[in-house]
Image (spheres, coloured by chain):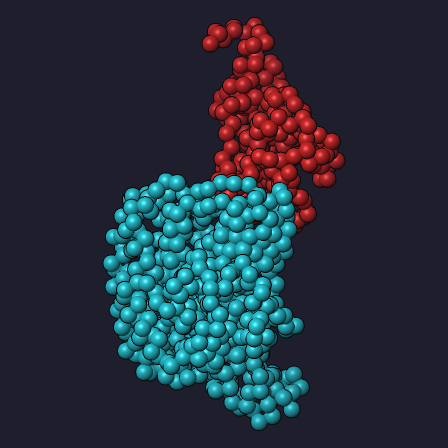
Amino acid sequence: MQKQIVIEPVTRIEGHAKITIQLADDGSVADANISVTQFRGFEKFVVGRPFYEMPSLTARTCGICPVSHLIAASKACDQILSVRIPETANKLRRILNLGQWIQSHALNFFHLSSPDLLLGMDETPEKRNIFRVMEVAPEKARDGIRLRAFGQTVIETLAGKRIHPAWVVPGGVSEPLSVEGRDKLLALLPEAKEIALRTLRWFKQSMSQYQDYVRTFANFPSLFLGLVDPSGNLEHYHGRLRVMDAAGRIIADQLDPLDYQNYIGEAIEPWTFLKFPYYKPAGYPEGIYRVGPLARLNIATQTGMPLADEELAEFHDLERGAALSSFYYHYARLIEILYAIEQIERLLADPAILRKDVRATGGVNHHEGIGMSEAPRGMLLHHYKVDENGLVTWANLIIASGHNNLAMNRGVLQVARHYVNGNTLTEGMLNRVEAVVRAFDPCLACSTHALGQMQMEITLLGPDGQALDRLARL
Amino acid sequence: MSPVPITTEPVKTFKINGQDVSARETESILQAARAHNIDIPTLCHLEGLSSTGACRLCMVEIKGSNKLFPACVTRVQEGIEVMTHSERLVKYRRMLMELIFSERNHVCAVCVVNGHCELQSTAQKLGMDHVRYPYLNPQLEVDASHERYAVDHNRCILCTRCVRVCDEIETAHTWDVMGRGIGSKVITDFNQPWGESETCTRCGKCVNVCPTGALFEKGKSVAEMAKQRQFLPYLVSRREAMIE
């Protein structure tokens, strides 16, 4: 008789989730999945609202990534206006998006994941948190806090506030950058760069001790999707899509984001509210793909930034084809932080960044808009249709955690198969399931205030529905 | 500027919150209080427009009566003793604010006037930290058919400032109110889309006097719409000077 382990709630994502692990008669894992159990309805309740509100409305999807939604939403609205965005505004938006990458990546790596890496997966939950990291490796904790603060300062300096700024608007941005603001950021850059470099050095040195996780953490063939510039280099704001297969072959390149419906399908499963995007030409579920830092570095030929390019070359040497283990998301995040710092430095060095013409205005000149950008967690897509008065009649959002849904599910199954056996649950098993989800950095982790751990409850049910074992972390 | 005419109008003396005050007999309790720097909260009242007593926030007590009196439309009287901030009034004003918030869909965080909104600032001033009544969450539309402006009925508190400014100052009378009670709604012309109104002069006075984000300029993003109201007293005084 089969038995089922249910992990519920996996909270502090954009809603709630549960993990179900199906055991076979011999106690081995037969199947596992992560399902999102809450419906939020953004695509429905924005209908009827003026499109000008869309950046701020959709930004409320998340308190960690409001900036990413502002960018994708404003890009969709730019198309409705059909005006040419001032180049300075585009550059300022780029800096903002990079600030978002830095703060979000630093949050995931240092605040949420470093307790696993520094203290070990089997450390007791009472100690496996950022406070313990502060005790055993205070310099790491300090670096994490400083780096995240830098990202947040970039956002605050440009947009006026750190969370839910309204500065990115259809047509550009609402305020130009001041000389004082630019100089403040330039003064903070060297420290941020130094932290990024030393963290990378440390992570690469300690990689040998994580080989077991490299092997088991969602390590499987899949496609990789992300934006690249016309030369095939790393891109985060404009750009076109590149698709790479597990062997590292580019199977599609320079796909127009406006045609996304031709190559991205969205499948629905009855047990979760999160859709399953897939690469249409490969079908469902074979069209499984990953987005985010791992995918972006896999597909990018170069980054265009000197220090990040050196790191990318090393990263590309990890495996013969694409780097397949989702554990490498952590590594990729660190390289992307370095890239973002170098990019910001370059953009701020251009005197044109201080130009005052940062906003184009217009009415409803087009009834549809599609905005695609790279959020910290991967490709983010906003697609709106409006009526002749500019009121939204239809909206579709595909968020990075959604793109990774198939991969996350397969990753949970893989890690459960590797670590779960028998009828008794152990704390280490619970944390490894948690940690594989955390490697993807879905909004599961991003909106947490729980200092490195999600609220989670695992119940092991017998065939008669009786709870055999139970582990809770609240 | 013409000299201020010396009034021969009789003056009434009375008390507000125990303080001796005086006012011309045609003045309201609200006018007298404000002339003496005594603050009474209002939402529908706007200097330069007629008073209507719609929002009920300016309710005051008068000694010897159990009734509450709207200060904006109650004239001063000799010897009365007015209380503007009794425990009962403070409690009722908070209840009124909560009822206004529960009646339609007020979402400050994503509103064009966030930070510049009279409803928001009044709620803060009155200490409203939550709403005890269930939200009605009505389904209300946005009319964005006008070339320059839009009306979002979700944010309308039915203060009728737009109706009054359009009628009394612009004299177009494009705006009016239809329906009754909670089902009331401000309309343009005969409940036509604003963009099809034949009487609207596109002057924008209604947008600027609106205390909330119900009336706004198209193209404004969140928190970008700060209303300009300086024109109103100026227009009124010019008009009165011309009549005289």
Q: Is residue B193 above or below residue A349?
A: above
Closer to the camera, A320 or A395? A320
- Seen at 61% across and 52% down, the residue is A385
Closer to the camera, A94 or A367? A367
**Can the viewer see residue A57 in this picture?**
no
Which chain does the cyan colour mark? A
Closer to the camera, A134 or B189? B189
**Can the viewer see residue A5 in this picture?**
yes
> Residue A342 at what x, y percent from top left?
30, 60
- Seen at 51% across and 43% down, the residue is B221
Closer to the camera, B215 or A282? A282
Q: Report which quarter residue A137 is drawn in.
A: bottom left
> Residue A76 at what x, y percent from top left?
52, 52
**Color of chain B here?**
red
| Quadrant of image for the N terminus of chain A | bottom right
Q: Is residue A52 above or below residue B14?
A: below
> Residue A57 at what x, y percent from top left?
54, 51
Total numbered badges shown on the rendered structure: 0
Q: Is residue B195 left or right of residue A333?
A: right
